[in-house]
Amino acid sequence: MVKYSMRTAGVCASQIEFGIEDGKLKDVRFHGGCPGNTLAISKLLEGYDAKKAVDILKGNVCGGKGTSCADQLAKGIEQALSQIA
C-alpha cells in the first residue's frame, strides 16, 4: 500500500491521509473537520475504488466555501492516481 498525506485548503480539516492499494482506498483519515461526517466518509470509502471515489466526491461543496473535505479528498486522490499511472 502506498500512503499519501495532504494539506487541505479552504476547509475545517487541516490534513487528510489515505492509502491506495490495488486501486482501492485504505485508511482514510481526516485531521479536523466535522468528526461525524469525516468518520462516515472514511468508513464508506474503505476498500472503495479510488477512481470511482473521485467521481462521487469531486465538486461537493460545504456552505459558500467552494470546496469541502470530501472535495479536497477527491483532489488528493486524483493527484495520487496521476503519480501512480
Image (cartoon, rainbow, N blue to C red):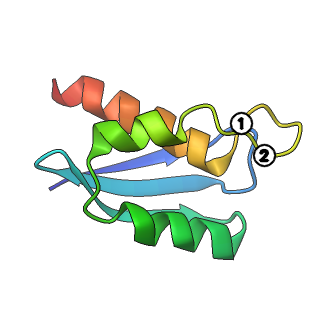
Residue at image position (38%, 39%) is 77
Q: Position of residue 64 (x, y in %)?
A: 89, 37
Q: Disc 1 marks which residue? A: 67
- Check disc 2 and report the residue beneath it: 62
Whether residue 76 appears in this view of the structure is no
Residue 55 % position (x, y): 43, 34
For badge 1, the amino acid type reads Thr
On screen, 19 above or below 63? below
Residue 48 position in % (x across, y down) = 29, 56
Task: Report if the CB atoms under discs 1 and 2 are less than 8 Å apart.
Answer: yes
**Which SS class for mark 1?**
loop
Q: Is residue 66 left or right of residue 1?
A: right
Residue 32: x and y in percent read 67, 65
Within the image, what quadrant is residue 82 found in?
top left
What residue occupies the far left of the structure in this picture?
22
| Badge 2 amino acid | Cys
> Is the residue 24 above or below the residue 31 in the image?
above
